[in-house]
Image (spheres, grey):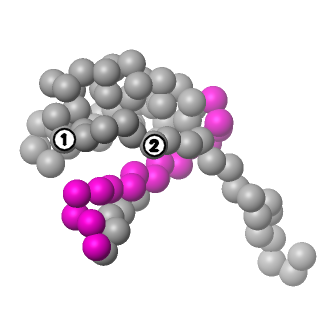
């Protein structure tokens, strides 16, 4: 990722409540990435997704590496509390 794009993405994440992020890639497909972002609330995640859809993915200039339509989902912890001893 070019330095300018990396800086822009980092700024966007810090301004929109991203707590943690992971970028992963299948071992057999170097043209595919999975980006997993953590937020404090569902609302923050949905707001970030809206920004991606309207300001980033809507323009080839803003997302030159994007091929096809991104697959997205706002997820929640399905395990509930992982308190030891329960």
Kindly check if marks 2 and 1 are in contact, taking CB atoms under 8 A apart as contact: no
Q: At 25% across and 39% down in the image, what residue appears? A: 66
Q: Residues within 10 Å of mark 1 (few under 14, many from 20)?
A: few
Give the structural element (helix, strand or loop) at label 2.
loop
Hey, which quadrant is residue 69 in on the image? top left
Q: At 53% across and 26% down in the image, what residue appears? A: 47
Give the structural element (helix, strand or loop) at label 1.
loop
Q: Which mark is residue 65?
A: 1
Residue 50: x and y, percent?
48, 24
Q: Is residue 19 visible?
A: no
53 vs 63, left or right, is: right
Hey, which quadrant is residue 26 in on the image? bottom left
25 vs 20, left or right, is: left
Q: Which mark is residue 30?
A: none
Residue 72: x and y, percent?
49, 41
The residue closer to the viewer here, 52 or 70, is 70
Q: At 47% across and 30% down in the image, what residue appears? A: 48
Does the segment drawn in magenta span residue 32?
yes
Q: Residues within 10 Å of mark 2 (few under 14, many from 20)?
A: few
Report the magenta residues as a range: 28-43
Q: Which mark is residue 71?
A: 2
Task: In the rendered view, tell whether residue 84 sits above or below residue 64.
Answer: below
């Amino acid at each position: 990722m070019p330095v300018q794009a990396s800086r822009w993405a980092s700024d966007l994440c810090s301004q929109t409540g991203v707590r943690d992020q992971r970028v992963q890639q299948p071992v057999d497909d170097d043209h595919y990435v999975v980006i997993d972002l953590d937020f404090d609330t569902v609302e923050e995640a949905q707001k970030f997704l809206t920004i991606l859809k309207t300001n980033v993915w809507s323009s080839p200039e803003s997302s030159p590496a994007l091929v096809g339509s991104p697959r997205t989902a706002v997820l929640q912890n399905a395990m509930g509390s992982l308190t030891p001893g329960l």
